[in-house]
């Protein structure tokens, strides 16, 4: 199976175009299957067949699949992405219905089952040379998720986590970018932290980290300059996080007063 993006020659014969991710995972590591399933769920992909997932064709969907395919290949798996249309065996309407299934009523409070939780005092691992998303995520972890968190800084690739460690904003991490959302935003979602001020902060952090203007908040340029100043004047990662903490605390206070 070659690493490639394939265009279907029949796509012009149908009214809808779809993207398929076809993958095969290695038997080890065990956590990879769980991680891939979680990522597929997070980007909203529907299972067409075993190891075949579908999304409506869009640039964002293609980027989501490409990001995941890269990670699968890096772990020794195989993945191809197809741009296609269906002409027999299944209709566009049947595929569309996969994205809006009727869900059984739950006896739990909304979101209860999906909320992540961690025991206090975990070791949180991330890449060396922390910048805006890792600085902000470390602040968020200490402030709202694990007040006794300890941080460990490692090489970007090739690190094998010790038992009990949690990785964030790095390759193959338990908590990292999903689609076009930065790690800070993913942490908010996974731990279900319902704070409008933090949501606003996530928009600022995401635009700085991704170097674009999806949200275009007026505070973004100023926060970016302050973060850059910390990074340029301090090489120690733990010190960068410590110095950035009051900045994010002040930004949180600012957004809290406006909501």
Image (cartoon, grey):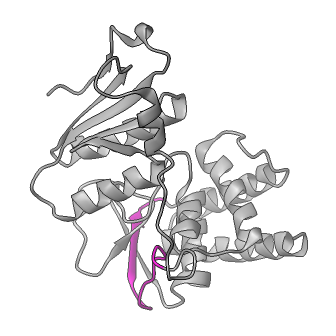
- Of the pair 79 and 17, the residue shown nearer to us: 17
* Residue 172 visible in image: no
Q: What residue is drawn where x is 34% and y is 17%?
A: 87
Asked if residue 211 is positioned above or below residue 235 in the image, the reply reads above
Image side of residue 233 versus residue 164, left or right: right
Image side of residue 208 versus residue 79, left or right: right
Q: What residue is drawn where x is 54% and y is 74%?
A: 111
**Image quadrant in which you'd find residue 54:** top left
Q: What residue is drawn where x is 66% and y is 70%?
A: 244
Please say whether residue 120 is one of the residues in the magenta stretch.
Answer: yes
**Residue 253: image x %, image y %?**
82, 76
Extreme residue in the right direction: 258
Asked if residue 67 is positioned above or below residue 159 in the image, the reply reads above
Image side of residue 86 versus residue 55, left or right: left
Tell me the quarter of the image containing the N terminus. top left
**Residue 161: image x %, image y %?**
25, 70
Please say whether residue 151 is one of the residues in the magenta stretch.
Answer: no
Q: Which residues are magenta?
A: 113-129
- Of the pair 174 and 42, the residue shown nearer to us: 42
**Residue 227: image x %, image y %?**
67, 59
| Magenta span: chief secondary structure | loop
Asked if residue 209 is positioned above or below residue 176 in the image, the reply reads above
**Image quadrant in which you'd find residue 68:** top left
Image side of residue 259 versus residue 203, left or right: right
Q: What residue is drawn where x is 49% and y is 91%?
A: 148
Tell me the quarter of the image containing the C terminus. bottom right
**Image quadrant in which you'd find residue 127:** bottom left
* Residue 244 visible in image: yes
């Amino acid at each position: 199976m070659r690493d490639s993006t394939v265009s279907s020659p029949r796509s012009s014969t149908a009214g809808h175009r779809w993207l398929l991710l076809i993958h095969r995972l290695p038997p080890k590591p065990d956590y990879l299957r769980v991680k891939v399933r979680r990522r597929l769920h997070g980007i909203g992909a529907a299972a067409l067949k075993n190891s075949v997932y579908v999304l409506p064709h869009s640039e964002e969907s293609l980027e989501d699949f490409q990001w995941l395919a890269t990670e699968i290949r890096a772990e020794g798996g195989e993945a191809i992405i197809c741009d296609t249309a269906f002409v027999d065996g299944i209709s566009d309407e049947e595929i569309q219905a996969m994205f809006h299934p009727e869900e059984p009523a739950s006896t739990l409070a909304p979101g209860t089952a999906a909320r992540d939780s961690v025991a206090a005092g975990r070791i949180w691992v991330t890449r060396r040379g922390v910048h805006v998303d890792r600085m902000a995520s470390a602040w968020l972890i200490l402030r709202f998720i694990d007040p006794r968190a300890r941080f460990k800084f490692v090489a970007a690739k090739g690190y094998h986590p010790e038992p009990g460690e949690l990785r964030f904003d790095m390759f193959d991490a338990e908590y990292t970018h999903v689609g076009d959302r930065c790690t800070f935003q993913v942490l908010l979602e996974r731990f279900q932290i319902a704070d409008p001020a933090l949501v606003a902060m996530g928009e600022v952090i995401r635009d700085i980290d991704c170097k674009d203007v999806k949200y275009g908040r007026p505070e973004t340029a100023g926060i970016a300059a302050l973060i850059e100043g910390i990074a340029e004047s301090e090489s120690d990662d733990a010190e960068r996080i410590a110095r950035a903490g009051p900045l994010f605390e002040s930004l949180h206070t600012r957004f809290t007063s406006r909501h």
